[in-house]
Image: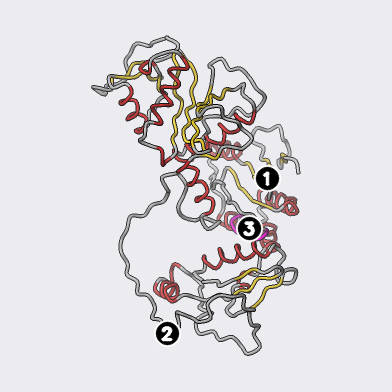
Amino acid sequence: MTERCIYIDPDPRDPRARKIDVRASQWYATVVLDRDEYVYASAPRGQSPELPDTYTEAVDRACNASMDRIFYDGYPGGFFWGRGPSRITLFAQFSQVEAAVEALRAAELDQDYTKLHAFADSLALPIDDWLAPGERELVRGIDFHAPPSAFLRFLRHKAKAQGLRLNGRATAGSVWVRPTLPFFQKEIRERFPEQHPGWVDRWTGYVDSDAAPIRPWVGGREHNLSYGAKPVQFRMKKIPELDSCRCGMRLQGAQDDGQAHATHHMAWEFGVRVPKSLMWLSNLAVVTTESPISWRKLAYKVARWPQVENHYDFRSWSHLDEPEQTSDNLRAYLLQANDCVIGYLAAHDTNEHRRWDLVRESRYAEGEDITLRPRINLIWVAGSYRLQGIGGALVRALADDFGCGITDVSWSTPVSDAGLRLAQRLSPEGVWVS
């Protein structure tokens, strides 16, 4: 599927024209209704940019149904999108792209939200039936169509969202499940009913009928070592609520049981894995905009970790097209250890600098220095290697490569707290900034 741009207003040349962008990825297509210029032009006329509640509700329902369907198909990743009146996003299977486009068109032009609801209904999955109480076998091709392992992973996520323990097992052509409600989850839902509207306990006290199928025994303990055990007692203690990890990823609301965060955090902690196709002749590689594409792709990949950690809008390396020579000699220093990139420094040369006195921590000096110096755009070190001199080693490599002293290196502003501490260690009296 190729990328498409569909204008839905009569005159596509109008700068306020609304359009629908369709972009394909490996597992699904992203359908985005771009209303940015339309909203911007509507504000001076006194029109509210906010979407009607019925519109938002229909979009959310369609989006949730389509994401469930994509996860059900076996997609192992996550979804990232913004909210607001400027852009409305739907994720769709390739076979559902036209239905998604038509539903957004009808909702935007005719305020007809029935197609969005119909889109959601067509993708709805019988999750309540799958998670009904009792031991049973769900057969592929009859009860579900996804690969059994992917289907079981999807069911575990849905069961966890409802507070259930699934007790499931995937076989070659089926999935065995026995959803149960743990005592503490039942207590939480009964104690805080306002947080779980519409919840009904269907699992406590449920007894399988004599005709219920018996799950084949595949080995394991012959005795139930929890028989007759007393429930664990719980107490409530106030603890700090953390919304994000040190690596920059969110801790809550993971659609994939935290797998994306675990993978990202592992690379943040120990470094980004080096492709086996790249041969390192030493542990420090200097990548330029004229380097082979495999090296520039590695620099682009590594640049993602400081971007996420510091919540930057853009990566500090973006040269993925044909090799080109830049006037400012843009380059990236990649430090490798244990087959992982553990240090990254992006830099270029410039001749606009001011002096910053770090002893008095005064404001930047008024006079501008026009000496050509290497300028640090960004430094990143993997979590486990921090406070071990890696950042200083990268700055020294930059200075040696340029042929200047380490105190002559320029630092891009604003300088982060970690960057300021590094600058004070390397150049205690002051640094050049630009």
Q: Is most of the magenta stretch helix, strand or loop?
A: helix
Q: Give the quarter of the figure containing the C terminus.
A: top left
Please state the horizontal and vertical placement of residue 169, each as a whole percent of the image: 61, 70
What residue is rendered at 51% in x and 30% in y? Answer: 316
Where are the magenta residues, as a range?
Answer: 58-73
Could you tell me the amino acid type at mark 2?
Gly
Residue in front for this viewpoint, 291 or 83: 291
> Which residue is at the front of the view, 111 or 391?
391
Q: Nearer the viewer, mark 1 or mark 2?
A: 2
Image position of 218 with respect to 280: above or below: below
Residue ID for mark 2: 228
Give the spatial CA distance, label 1 vs label 2.
Answer: 51 Å
The circle on residue 25 is 1
Query: What is the secondary structure assignment of the residue under circle 3?
Result: helix
Q: Amino acid at mark 1?
A: Ser
Residue drawn at x 68%, y 40% is 19
- The residue labelled by disc 3 is 71
